[in-house]
Image (cartoon, rainbow, N blue to C red):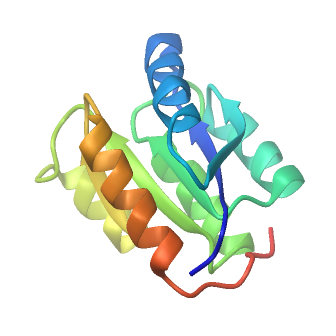
Amino acid sequence: MSDKLDVVVVDDSRSVLRHLERMIADIEGVSLVGTAGDGASALRLVAEVKPDLVLMDIVMPDMDGLTALRLIRSKAKDLRVVMLSSMGGASSRAEEAFRLGAIQVLGKPIDRGQLEALFEAELEAPRERPEA
């Protein structure tokens, strides 16, 4: 078991970012190492901080989450990315996210139980630090 999980959160909604920041702050073994409001900022942040896990909204202005996922995965093939969607998991965008390498799609609003289960599974999983 790894002792710490470094997480980046990407969402254009400031209220969603604040909600996730508060939840993550209270979860042992998980460290929020950065936030971004769009896909382009996410690309720069991921390259800079090299997180273990990215939580990223699918629908964002300018560069959406699917485009950012495609570019992130082209540079960091082992980086674990979970997409966030207010449209539910059955949409064509969610299917595209899985095709592009997302490990999971979580529906919004994200609840604490979902987040804790995700982080627990990630902390238990053997992993190497991704190259970004």
Q: Is residue 71 left or right of residue 83?
A: right
Q: Nearer the viewer, residue 37 or 59?
A: 37
Residue 5 at what x, y percent from top left?
A: 63, 60
Q: Is residue 17 left or right of residue 31?
A: left
Up the image or down, 92 lies above or below 34; here it is below
Q: Is residue 51 visible?
A: yes
Q: Nearer the viewer, residue 55 or 5?
A: 5
Residue found at x 62% / y 30%: 38
Q: Residue furthest right?
A: 48
Q: Residue furthest left?
A: 90
Up the image or down, 116 lies above or below 58; here it is below
Up the image or down, 41 lies above or below 45; here it is above
Residue 36 at what x, y percent from top left?
A: 67, 31
Quarter occupied by the N terminus: bottom right
Quadrant hosting residue 130: bottom right
Residue 98 at what x, y percent from top left?
A: 33, 68
Residue 65 at what x, y percent from top left?
A: 49, 44
Quadrant hosting residue 132: bottom right
